[in-house]
């Protein structure tokens, strides 16, 4: 997975993550997990605290969203 350019991996992760509600089976997929773990390691190597959702989002190229907004907009995916 890490042989692909970082920008492409971020793009694919953002697209997949944005559609989890429509495709909840992705949540347990090995490919999404491997992609996420690899990206988190790359982010940590650049000094990003991946536990900070805003920092993680910004590093991925998403618009950072505060935890208060995140919790208020949380949906249950079944």
Image: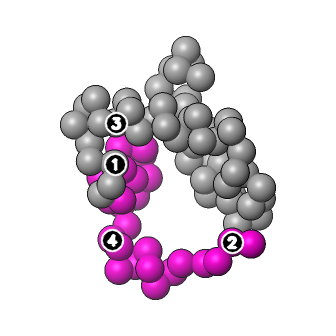
- Residue 13: say if magenta: no
What number is the disc on residue 66? 4
What number is the disc on residue 50? 1
Q: Secondary structure at mark 1?
A: loop
Which residue is identified by label 3? 43
Q: Secondary structure at mark 3?
A: helix
Residue 32, x across and y down, in percent: 64, 42
Tell me which residue sits at (26%, 47%) in the image.
Answer: 49
Per the rendered image, the range of residues in magenta is 53-78
The answer for how far apart the CA atoms under marks 4 and 1 are is 14 Å
66 above or below 32?
Answer: below
- Residue 64: say if magenta: yes
Which residue is identified by label 2? 77
Find residue 42 and report its image quarter: top left
Q: Please tell me whether mark 4 or mark 3 is closer to you in this view.
A: 3
Residue 55, x across and y down, in percent: 30, 52
Residue 31, x across and y down, in percent: 67, 36
Tell me which residue sits at (30%, 36%) in the image.
Answer: 44
Label 3 close to label 1 by CB (< 8 Å): yes
């Amino acid at each position: 997975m890490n042989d692909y350019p970082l920008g492409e991996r971020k793009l694919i992760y953002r697209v997949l993550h944005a559609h989890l509600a429509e495709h909840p089976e992705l949540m347990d997929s090995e490919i999404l997990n491997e992609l996420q773990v690899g990206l988190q390691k790359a982010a940590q190597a650049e000094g990003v605290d991946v536990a900070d959702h805003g920092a993680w989002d910004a590093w991925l190229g998403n618009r950072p969203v505060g935890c208060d907004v995140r919790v208020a907009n949380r949906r249950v995916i079944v």
